[in-house]
Amino acid sequence: MKNLSATIVALFTFAGVTFPAIASVISPLGSAAENTAAIQAALDAAAKEAVPGTVTLGEGTFEINAQLTVTGGVTLVGQG
């Protein structure tokens, strides 16, 4: 099983304004089930932040086996 390459970066505050940092970067994993679970977990974590973040799909092909839910102002972006 490959390691999940997801990095959750904390929010930072400057002059009383909170800015989202990069929420996470996901790399393709071995199976569709692993990819689906990793992406959804990152989306869910980003939605729980005070200021919703961005989940970035890294380079590669992501096979998934279920519908993903993007909520709470989270942005999902890809590399290509």
Image (spheres, rainbow, N blue to C red):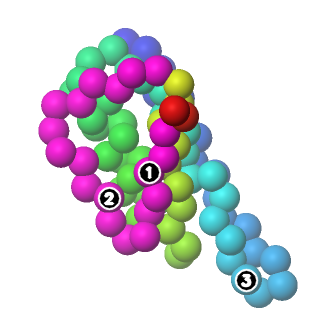
Tag 3 residue: 17
Q: Which mark is residue 11?
A: none
Q: Amino acid at mark 1?
A: Leu
Mark 1 near mark 2, Cβ–Cβ under 8 Å?
yes
Residue 15 pos. (x, y %) = 83, 84
Question: In terms of secondary structure, where does tag 3 sit?
Answer: strand
- Which residue is at the front of the view, 20 or 75? 75
> Label 1: few (<14), some or many (≥20) within 10 Å?
some
Residue 54 pos. (x, y %) = 53, 55
> Label 3: few (<14), some or many (≥20) within 10 Å?
few
Tag 2 residue: 70
Magenta-colored span: 60-78
Residue 4, above or below 8: above
CA–CA distance between discs 1 and 2?
8 Å
Front position among marks 3 and 2: 2
In the image as oriented, which residue stretches furthest toward the right?
15
Q: Amino acid at mark 2?
A: Val
Residue 57 pos. (x, y %) = 48, 36
Q: Residue at x 37, y 71 (%)?
A: 72
